[in-house]
Amino acid sequence: LPSINSKKSKEYNVWLIFTKVTNVSTLSYKFRDLLHNLLNVSSVPLKFNIIVDKVSQTIAENQITEVLLYGRKSLVYSFYDIEDCAKKIQDIVEVMTPHFSSKPGTYYSDALFYISLGLYRIAPLNQHYAILLDCDLYFKKDISLLFDEFAKFKSSALFGLAPELTPVYRHILHAYKSKHNTTFGEFYHDGGNSSNQSHPNGFQGYNTGVVLINLGAQRKSLEFPKVVSNESVQAMTTKYRFRGHLGDQDFYTLMGYEYPHLIQTLHCGFNRQLCTWWRDHGYSGIFSDYFKCSHDVIVLHGNCNTRIPKR
Ligand code: UDP
Ligand code: MN
């Protein structure tokens, strides 16, 4: 019989979202560069799963052709239609958007920001593990290091996420923090001793540029459907007076407060964000405490359109 480990090690499912793209969008170059980068840096056979609309699929096919001409490698991939995906997660999206979307958009533009939460319904049943990646990433090291993290998951974890590296959740929690003594929203630091709660050393929240998903465990979970229910989301947003605009990562951050057993925290080197917007918007004094990352960098994340230094 194959051991659990060998089963794990045979699956290298990478998921990408590539929608609302035009021939001139920078997203199309980010997508091409990331595919090229992943083919170069991976020691394992990746399976790409790409969520697209019709126009974006054509652009993706052209970019894949370019990568293959240039790189002389092969690439295993499938496309998934965003409208089909949106239908499958409609209930989750309806619960989340009032709290975590900046403005209600068109039919599928909302769904785009919550795919990670419902990917277990979209992915084929023979996929047990998946990594959902933003397109604005650059891998400095082998992506197999990221897949290796699944083996380190605590048994209750459904997701693996690295910290958000700005004070955005300190900002959002302002009202709650003015009345409660909590490490939530504080930057990560050594020597915390409030051992009666989770995240004693500060908790910056999570960033969703890199999301590890234990699809098999999520499909079996009796708890997860309750956590994404309207009652649960209402209760959490009310308790923390939380109004966000960053989609699924706002929800994961709340999960980190109330259901920390469901999330495995990855170190910051697995999603080293580069956006410095908050430094210039009221947080210059403490920005660097949030932004610092002392771990080895495996993945750079050029979020908020930040240019990625590639050597
Ligand atoms: N995305 C997309 N179409 C869009 C905008 C975003 O498909 O019009 C996808 C794409 O995979 C992108 C991800 O959503 O990487 C998140 O957006 P982005 O990385 O720009 O957000 P940031 O990391 O800057 O918050
Ligand atoms: Mn990004």
Image: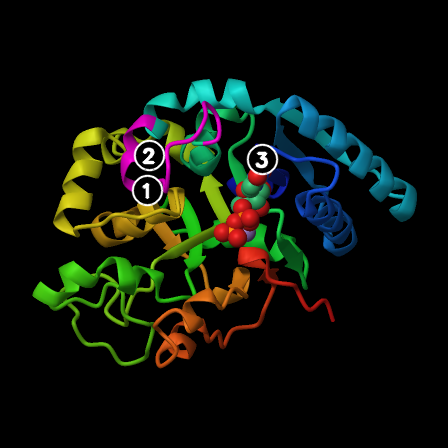
121 shown above or below 31: above
- Residue farthest toward the left in the current orientation of the protein: 179
* Residue type of the residue flagged with mark 3: Pro
Closer to the camera in the image, 99 or 128? 99
Is 98 magenta? The answer is: yes
Examine the rendering and report whether any part of residue 143 can be seen.
yes
Residue topped by disc 3: 2
Image quadrant where one finds the C terminus: bottom right
Instruction: Tell me the colour scheme of the image.
Output: rainbow
Q: Secondary structure at mark 3?
A: loop
First-in-chain label (3 vs 1): 3
- What residue is drawn where x is 15% and y is 60%? 175
Is 102 magenta? The answer is: yes
Examine the rendering and report whether any part of residue 133 can be seen.
no
Q: Secondary structure at mark 2?
A: helix
Closer to the camera in the image, 207 or 214? 207
61 shown above or below 38: above
CA distance for labels 1 and 2: 5 Å
Residue topped by disc 2: 97
Query: Ligand 1 within 8 A of label 3's CB?
Result: no
